[in-house]
Image (tube, grey):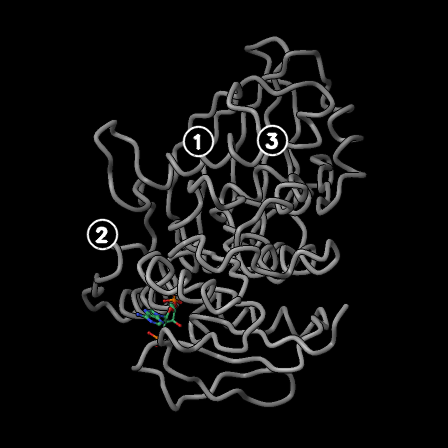
Amino acid sequence: MSASLTVAVVGATGAVGREMLSTLASRDFPASTCIALASARSAGAVVPFKDGELPVRELTEHSFKGVDLALFSAGGGTSETFAPHAVKSGCVVVDNSSAWRMDERCPLVVPEVNPHALACHKGIIANPNCSTIQMVVALQPLHKAAGITRIVVSTYQAVSGTGHKAVTELETQVRQMFNMTEPAVSVYPHRIAFNCLPQIDAFLDNGYTKEEMKMVMETAKIMEDPSIKVTATTVRVPVFYGHSESLNVEFARPLTAREARAVLSVAPGVTVLDNPAEKIYPMPIHAAGEDNVFVGRIRQDESRPNALNMWVVADNIRKGAALNAVQIAEQLLRDKLLRVPDPGAFA
Ligand code: A2P
């Protein structure tokens, strides 16, 4: 790997941006220079990096001169506006927002599932939605084993997925409620402390939320199989870090719970935690701060032939965002794909 790369993190002051910096450092990503970018509000602030700090600079269209790789996590609008400027400067973008995920020019990649999709990138690679990433990491090995035909998923998503402000809101509301004062509601439409919100992102005309439809559309693109039927209910829960998912999965061929456990126990990026007799199963308190996707409660769906139920938990900020983005960058380096084939591709 080249040791002279210049890497920028866009949204470096946010929950995911900070984790991107810490993941680049902890995985020894071969960057000689790291640049922290955020909005004008943060210019002059500092963010932790390795044993020291990085100064935060304001993101502008000129920020990418001489930058080889930019990891974006500053919202869809920022990515839509600035990722094309980065590509024009010859900088490869790995974008954590939803802006480019369904764009045909942009591969949507989970390295354990579809690393080959990177080969045709044109400068922007999309990082999938956090809930989709952990689901496909757990399901791709089972799909190979028995052919998935349908997925019914319900999520229990942590507030950190909404960003730093939502983490603060939950913390503040809990304190306010213990002090018997009225909790202030601003990030979510309702109180999140001691509550569950069956709404993540905006509602669409079909009655589903954008988050639910992301899971449907992104799964088909990543698993490269539009014949797999997916239906989702996504719920925000008062957990700080770690998304959980209840999955009901139907297969074309029979697959027992024991066989599924055996397949998953050797799958990349997966840890099976499944011993009900000892009360061992995945929980957000275990997954937070971990790289792997945890799978447990694997059991036959007794109401359907060839169907299994399972419970999947992962750190939404790590595997669901920052780690997956850095793994994409590592794969690009390994495959010698860290170059922009056509700087005008998104002009
Ligand atoms: P800033 O802190 O300057 O607002 P989170 O998802 O945790 O809320 O973080 C969002 C990240 O995206 C922050 O780093 C934030 O920077 C950054 N951001 C938001 N809007 C912009 C923008 N218009 N230009 C650059 N960075 C932005």
Q: Please rate how many residues cluster around mark 3, counting C-alpha atoms within 10 Å: few if below 14, some from 14 to 19, many from 20.
A: many
Would you place residue 2 above or below residue 337 in this image? below
- How many numbered marks are there? 3
**Where residue 173 sits in the image (x, y, percent)?**
29, 65
Would you place residue 37 above or below residue 122 in this image? below
4 displayed left or right of 87: right
Residue under the image location 47 percent in, 47 percent down: 129
Quarter of the image where ligand 1 sits: bottom left
Q: From the viewer's side, name the closer residue of 22 and 289.
A: 22
Residue 4 tag number: none
| Element under disc 3 | strand
Residue 190 tag number: 2
Outermost residue, top side: 305
Cα separation, mark 3 vs mark 2, equals: 29 Å
Which residue is labeled 1 in the image?
216
Q: Please rate how many residues cluster around mark 1, counting C-alpha atoms within 10 Å: few if below 14, some from 14 to 19, many from 20.
A: many
The kind of residue on which mark 1 rests is: Val
Q: Which callout, 1 or 2, points to the residue nearer the camera? A: 1
Q: Quadrant of residue 248?
A: top right
Residue under the image location 66 percent in, 39 percent down: 113
Q: From the viewer's side, name the closer residue of 124 and 77.
A: 124
Which residue is labeled 3 in the image?
310
The kind of residue on which mark 3 rests is: Met
Whichever of labels 3 and 2 marks the residue nearer the N terminus, that label is: 2
232 displayed left or right of 255: left
| Element under disc 1 | helix
Cα separation, mark 3 vs mark 1, equals: 18 Å
Residue under the image location 47 percent in, 74 percent down: 64
Would you place residue 204 above or below residue 293 in this image? above
The quadrant of the picture occupied by the C terminus is bottom left
Q: Are marks 3 and 2 in contact (CB under 8 Å)?
A: no
Whichever of labels 3 and 1 marks the residue nearer the N terminus, that label is: 1
